[in-house]
Amino acid sequence: MKFRPCIDIHNGKVKQLVGGTLRDDEDRAEENFVSEKDAAYYASLYKSDGLIGGHIIILNPMSSPFYIEDREQARAALAAFPGGLQIGGGMNDTNAQEFICMGASHIIFTSFVFNDGEINYENLGKLVKKIGSGRIVLDLSCRKRGGEYYIVTDRWQKFTEVMISHDALDKLAGYCAEFLVHAVDVEGKAAGIEIELATLLGSWNGIPITYAGGVSSYADLELLRSKTSGRIDVTIGSSLDLFGGKLEYKKIVEMCR
């Protein structure tokens, strides 16, 4: 299990949000933490600790008046740790290469691939042709409905009809290098991991997966490792002392070495 750090950018600031509260109208969200430091600070910290494979997420849509500020924060972070960070949020076949040129190692896609409730294989093909599957990360962030986990898009506001399953992971793995999975219902709440989802992901043997959502204690981290046999990596946001939480960043880094 590797620790994959994060930098979430909203309204031009590095923040930690309660995932299910994000709304495009008026760029609203319930905030857990707003940093006084910029994205480049966190990128430089992750670089100094050799934490390759973390991710930047731009949380405003491109239509937002804050998007330009978000983008500049992201640009500075990528410049501070070239080749060390992935980036997602509003990514498509026309802007992906631009962020790679800024220094992103991989581009994270959600809504461009999962739209109208289904997997858009035509768009997936465009991405593979444009930047290659080795640079693609598919965001399978999901919420529970009817006892199953379904992929959600548009900053986690819209349900698709795509259910997280081994079959779905098998089908999508040929188009990408990694999966990123936010357990949206517990994201930003520091209330414990989604054990059922983590177990499902950990029982699949394929490309790398990073799990995010709900880690609130060192015991949660060990539980995640146990339930997944250490097969998946982890992101911790709101619970980390870097973002106002109680878990020590340095200790988490050492636990996941």
Image: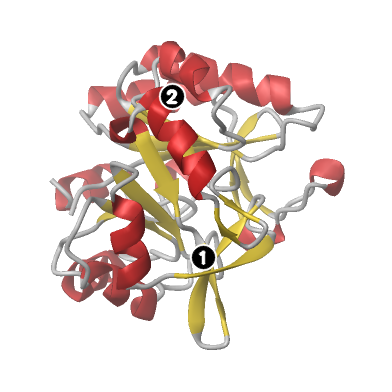
The colour scheme of the drawn protein is secondary structure
Q: Position of residue 194 (x, y in %)?
A: 41, 74
The residue that label 1 is drawn on is 142
Q: Position of residue 248 (x, y in %)?
A: 32, 49
**Which amino acid type is shown beneath numbered disc 2?**
Lys
Q: Position of residue 81 (x, y in %)?
A: 34, 18
Q: Is residue 220 above or below residue 89?
A: below
Residue 215's image quarter? bottom left
Neighbor class of circle 1 (other Cα within 10 Å; few <14, some 14-19, many 20+) is many
Report, in whole angstroms, how far the alpha carbon at label 1 lies from the one at label 2.
26 Å
97 relative position to 203: left or right: right
Which is closer to the viewer, label 1 or label 2? Answer: 2
237 relative position to 69: left or right: left
The residue that label 2 is drawn on is 130
x 43%, y 24%: residue: 130
Of 10 and 112, nearer the camera is: 112
The C terminus sits in image quarter: top left
Residue 239 appears in the figure: yes
